[in-house]
Image: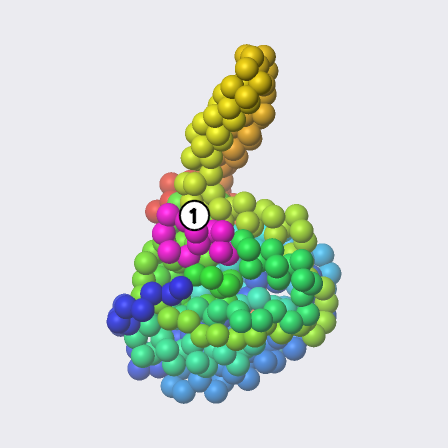
Amino acid sequence: MPATRTPTQLTAVAARPLVSVVVPCLDEAAVIGETHRRLTAVLRGLPECEHEVVYVDDGSRDATWDRLTALAAADPRVRLVRLTRNFGHQPAVLAGLREASGDAVITIDADLQDPPGLIADMVERWRAGWPVVSARRTGRQGESRFKTGTAHVFYRLLAAVADHPVNLDTGDFRLLDREVVRTLTLLPESELYLRGAVCWAGFPETSLEYGRLPRPAGRTKYTLRKMAGLSRRGLLACSSAPARVPGAVGLAWLGGTALTSAVLRRPLPPAAWAFGGQAVLLGVLGEYLLLIHREVRGRPPYVVHQRWASGVPAPAELVAADVTASPEAWATGSVR
């Protein structure tokens, strides 16, 4: 559960603070116009706040980019980031966090399953001093029992084995203070699991409860494969428990084999002692070696193809900077 410590305002906020909303998009042409309409309706109603909306096109293959450029041409408070291909939801959110300029940054998906109306309550909590305001799901309409059931089990498994507190039933719909955003975007991990990283950072946090809504249009982009990949990333990023599985399995295997040998009153062949245990051990160690391999390559988690601000494309040299930046530049946060 979120921390219950006294809230602390970390950023010196101007008289009219800027609230940024980061929206990752993948093939959302059918819904993006309605998403923007609802977002701007809420943002315009925020008392004494300026706002901007940063859309990140994560390699869409439909008309999403065309719809976004039309929105940017009509609204100077819309900023666009287009990635060269589909890098995944977490890298897309990270790209938006690095682009956002707000004193507070809100991340929300484009599919309208997370209600934009909750943003006003998030900003109110933030202005009361909370640096992290998360949205906790109490229901998930329009989703299969398999998806809701596996999500329920995963969050509780992760909370049980994680090396730091992890919030239950909380996705990426949350508000982050500028200081929290700065902390997250300076982390050098290329396989960053943002949900876990927010909890790891340890800033005081409060939460709002809501029921997730069904999609008004389009279809989910979170396939079973992507859900499994996100779960794997979260488990390896938040917990060292999988690294301890080999020792536990090895001891259990040896104990079971010894017990069987005692019951049968005869020694078992060497293969009975080694076969299954070795397979499990190598599988778990292989996951960690793969994670290390990805980290030591030093590749950035995404590559920007194009930016738009104030209704016009960004200069080409600004875009190229993301492609040619050294790993050291990414690690120190000198590349946004």
Q: Quadrant of the C terminus?
A: bottom left
Which of 58/150 is in front?
150
In percent of width and height, residue 137 lies at 53, 69
Mark 1 burial class by Cα count in 10 Å: few <14, some 14-19, many 20+: some
* Residue picked out by circle 1: 161
Identify residue type, mark 1.
Answer: Val
What residue is rendered at 58% in x and 25% in y? Answer: 276
Magenta residues, start to end: 155-166
In percent of width and height, residue 84 lies at 61, 50
Which of 104/254 is in front?
254
Which of 249/239 is in front?
249
Residue 261 appears in view: yes
* Number of marks in picture: 1
* 99 versus 286 height, above or below: below
Give left or right: position of 126 versus 88: left
In percent of width and height, residue 91 lies at 52, 52
Give left or right: position of 182 versus 259: left
The image quarter in which residue 189 lies: top left
Name the element at disc 1: helix
In percent of width and height, residue 328 lies at 38, 41
* 323 versus 61 height, above or below: above
Give left or right: position of 49 versus 261: left
* 197 versus 136 height, above or below: above
What residue is rendered at 54% in x and 18% in y? Answer: 261
Q: Quadrant of the N terminus?
A: bottom left
Query: Is residue 162 a member of the stretch shown in magenta?
Result: yes
Which of 7/87 is in front?
7
Residue 314 appears in view: no
What residue is rendered at 52% in x and 26% in y? Answer: 256
What residue is rendered at 28% in x and 72% in y? Answer: 7
Query: Is residue 335 a member of the stretch shown in magenta?
Result: no
Q: How is the image coloured?
A: rainbow
